[in-house]
Structure formats: C-alpha cells, structure tokens
Amino acid sequence: MRPHIEIIDQQDYLWHMAEFLHGEGQARQRNLSYDEEDGSCSARIEFVTDWGRPGGVHHAETEWYILEGQVQLGEQTLTAGDYWMAPTGVYTPAITVKAGTVILFFREYGDWGFDITDRSRDFVREDQFLKVHQTSKMPWIPVELGSPMRFDLGGTPVPGLFIKMLHRDEKTGFYTRLIKAKPGWREHPLAHHPCYEEAYCLEGGFEYNYGEMWPGTYFFRPALIRHGDFTSAMDEGCTWIVRSDSDLVDWYTDDARVEMHGTPQNYGPDFPGTAMPRLLQPVRSRSIGPWEDPAYT
C-alpha cells in the first residue's frame, strides 16, 4: 500500500539513482510515491547523459510519459507529451534517450526487474501489448463521450472536462489518461472512490479542499479519501495526468463540514498565568516556503 500524499511539489523530494537495470548512461529519479510491499513506484526521472538499453521485458507494468526531450523506442521517435506503456512480460524494443530528457515514470505490481530478451514471456495475456501514443495528435474527448468518470448526483456528466485515454486494462479497469479542465470549471461536492487515484499537474492549476495545485505538484490518494470542491484556474484551466487502479466511480458528499467543540482545561482567561494558544505559521516546504495564508499575517 502506498501512503496518502496530498499536494507535494516534486522539487521537495530527494534525488536517487534511477532504478534501471542493464542500461548504459546516467539517470536520476525523484520518487513521488513508493509501495514498499510490492515495488510499485511513481517517479520523475531525469537523464543526465545519453542513455540506452537493449530490448527485453519488465517485471512490472511500466509507463513513461515524456515531459521534455527525446526518446527513441524501437523505430518510433517520441518527444514531449508522448507516452508508452508495457504490461508485465510484454516485449519492449531497444530504447535510447537523449541527455536532458525528463519523464514521468510509473511502475505497477512489481519492482525494477528487467530481463534482456528478444520476445515476450509466455504468461502474457493475449489482450496485452505495447502501447505507444503521440498524444499531440490525439483529440480531446468530452468526458461524457469517452469516460465513465465525473457524473453528478443525478448521473449527468459534469461539463467542462476533456480526456485523452492513454491506457485502460479491459479486465481490471486500470487506466492512465490526460484530463483537461476548462478555465473556471468547478465540481463542488466532496467525492471519494473505491479505487486509488493519483495525479501530476502538467499545466495550469486548481484549488480544492486540500489546497492548490500547480505544474509539478502531485498527489496519491488511497481509496475512500474524501476530496473535492474543485475549481480550475480562471485564466488557463488545468491539465494533469491521472491514474487509477480501476474504473473511477464518484461517491459524493454534499454539504460537508467539520466541527469541533470543547471546554478549555488549562488555558485561556479563566486560568491565571496562561494565555490562549497561538497559531503557528505552517511551513509549506523547504523549496516553496511558508503557506501564503492571511490568517498568519
């Protein structure tokens, strides 16, 4: 199980040596989230030098989304915004990467194992194969036409959202997709899901109950964590890459609120020599600095 991570900027993570076997060259990674039980990982990887690896098969479902630079996957040249995915055991052709390339890397249900070979493993399902997308050439599809996600309480699709489906497992519903919200799009009730949900903000931003997201921020949310009251940036909307381990089902909570009541025991004006607790300013992160909250100014 991965821990609940809500709004972390990738700059706040430490660099580690990239978890690649049989590769030639140097790469480093910042782990966005990590499952210490089965090796699943989401990371941002930077290739410090030119890098390459022969063809073979991964021990885990593996996905690359290219943020910057160039990747040569077999005969296909991929650049910023492009994507490829290899299910466990499916043959992946030789790959070369130019220095300075940056990717989002996702590994599911396994560790960094990789075997050099010229064919897929025998146990691969017949409906699984290498997927490669030049996403700039894919159209944005309105959610109501291309996705089971984001329906309101009456079952009507929420307008203003568009998707590019990059990967979906027909048996499990596991998916990876790009989502774009138009400027000022809003979904007001809190929602939770029977599946996990993770996202990395690519462009624009939005506000919700946990705070604000901007490019480079990330969350990993286990099943059943309530979140919401989303509002995308008024000037440019928001685009993010989203993954979930099954088809997303929204369970809504409207009129949500949290209330705390109690009687002070040893502080305040009724207790000599004490004072009311003073709110301390929380620190956003070492790289971003303090929260900008009027309550603390």
Image (cartoon, rainbow, N blue to C red):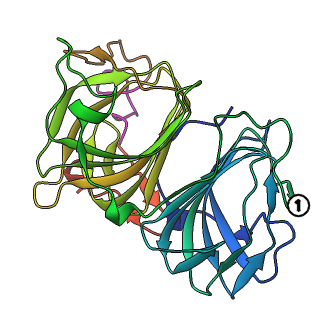
288 or 8: which is nearer to us?
8
Residue 142, given in percent of the width and then of the height, sits at: 21, 40
Q: Which residue is pictured at 75% across the width and 79% down the height? A: 52
Q: Amino acid at mark 1?
A: Thr
Q: Quadrant of residue 269 in the image? A: top left
Instruction: Give the extent of the magenta segment.
Output: 267-278
**Is residue 236 depicted above or below 164 in this figure?**
below
Residue 103, given in percent of the width and then of the height, sits at: 55, 68
127 or 53: which is nearer to us?
127
In this rendering, the count of numbered labels is 1
| Left/right of residue 279 with respect to residue 143 in the rendered view | right
| Left/right of residue 94 with respect to residue 13 in the rendered view | right
Classify mark 1: helix, strand or loop: loop
271 is within the stretch colored magenta:
yes
Q: Quadrant of the N terminus?
A: top right
**Is residue 16 depicted above or below 279 in this figure?**
below
Q: Which residue is pictured at 42% across the width and 26% down the height? A: 248
| Left/right of residue 63 with respect to residue 197 in the rendered view | right
Q: Quadrant of the C terminus?
A: bottom left
What residue is shown with label 1? Answer: 117
Question: Would residue 272 be visible to someone looking at this image?
Answer: yes
Residue 75, given in percent of the width and then of the height, sits at: 61, 74
Question: Would residue 281 be visible to someone looking at this image?
Answer: no
